[in-house]
Image: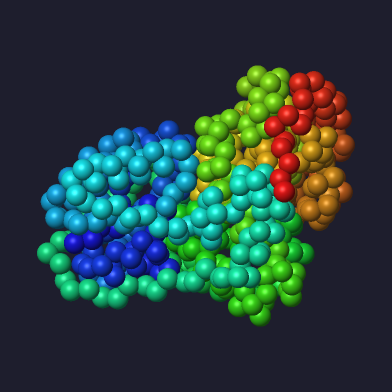
Amino acid sequence: MQLIWLRSDLRQHDNTALAAAAARGPTVAVYLLSPQQWLEHDDAPCKVDFWLRNLRELSASLGQLNIPLLIRTASHWDQAPAELLKLCRQLKIAAVHVNEEYGVHESRRDAAVAETLKAEGITFHSYLDQLLFKPGSVLTKTESYFKVFSQFRKVCYERLHRSMPALVKAPGKQEKLEVSSDPIPDSVKGFSTPSQTLRDLWPAGEKEARRRLDTFTDAQIDYYQSERDFPAKPGTSQLSAYLAAGVISPRQCLHAALQSNQGEFESGKVGAVTWINELLWREFYKHILVGYPRVSRHRAFRQETEALAWRDAPDDLAAWQEARTGLPIIDAAMRQLLETGWMHNRLRMIVAMFLTKNLLIDWREGERFFMRHLIDGDLAANNGGWQWSSSTGTDSAPYFRIFNPLSQSEKFDSEGLFIKHWLPELAALNKKEVHNPADVGGLFGAADYPSPIVNLSTSRQRALAAFKNLPSRTSSGGDDE
């Protein structure tokens, strides 16, 4: 008997470990609930709920193939080896199959499980699945991990030209086993149930993920490059939550994008090329996680920035978290996050720069808050984005590049449609006033909106001074080939 241990790969199609297990013989699937570990990792309640809802869909589709899905609990990953060994003994499992996960804790967990099983004569197989390229296979000429995205992307393109990662065939129906599927719990202790409104925005299951991918690549992808920066427009694929939970794979996304672009990934439709680049950014940050494990441990990629004199400003942090900074684009973005579990990517950069530069608050505070609220929260992408915005990371924005939230707002929400949607108290302002109600002096129905908590100009100078005072801004740079 074969066991597939499901983690961030909650799908039946193009699932490498599932296909490999089923090819070897009768297969059973297991999912471990790990609430203590999830709390330690700041996983958002809406994300845990999304996992459970997707498990329910997956259990039904695996059930049609006679593959039972069992639910076990290893509250902390330290308990995973014992829990899986117990199950393997019960079911007389010969081999356990998993899709690789990345990050320090994930790697340690898998190594401990493999060792425990091996001592009992049970083999442990792990497969490349949530990435297009195995970490360690895309390296510089000096055999080190890339630190600059454009150079990493160039090598990825060369590899894709040589061989395109193939989709994995879904397993067929197997003989009925004497094992029954477990019910999927409705909730997990320690994680609140999100609103029905939020759940409705993110329906579970592979069919929905596939529908979103098809809708996007059929038409929207053509406008992706020109519309993706405008939060009031439906310019993005809305697939990030499905990718993070593994309800759809990067291979499926890449194949669909190529199909819409006559097989081209460097030329042809600029929208398709831009979106494929975004898939490669996601890839890049996962490779960084493996190549530079310190980012998994909440350390800055640019080590000299650990010396930055961040402000301890709990009131400012709370105003940012609670969407009352007095800067409409920031507050509208934060309300979107709090109510939907998601934030538009352009806005993620704007609010991150505001927190780390204008408020000079440690990027780790923002990273943690995002993880606790994002349905698509992913350690590698979230950490990469925060470190990019705070100029502490790989390929980061130069420290002197500080987005001005007012000009960003005027540029990307010129009509104020996004702001007015999330801040209805500003609905009476015209499209010029809505970006900065402080100028209006509380007239025209903006009386109950707070004044800005910070002066953008002086706070910018403060940030520049803090970065200029660092010992050396290039010490950890290192050149890539």
Q: Nearer the viewer, residue 118 or 90?
A: 118
Q: Nearer the viewer, residue 352 or 278?
A: 278
Instruction: Please name the residue shown 53% across and 37% down the image.
Output: 293
Question: Among all residues in the image, which is located at the extreme front?
Answer: 142
Residue 48 image position (x, y, % from top left): 41, 47
Q: Nearer the viewer, residue 474 or 352?
A: 474
- Answer with left or right where residue 139 lies relative to residue 89: right
- Answer with left or right where residue 9 lies relative to residue 156: left
Residue 240 image position (x, y, % from top left): 55, 56
- Answer with left or right where residue 389 lies relative to residue 180: right
Residue 231 image position (x, y, % from top left): 70, 55
Question: Among all residues in the image, which is located at the extreme bottom?
Answer: 262
Q: Where is 19 relative to 394, above or below?
A: below
Instruction: Please name the residue shown 77% across and 25% down the image.
Output: 472
Rendering quarter of residue 112: top left
Residue 133 image position (x, y, % from top left): 54, 58
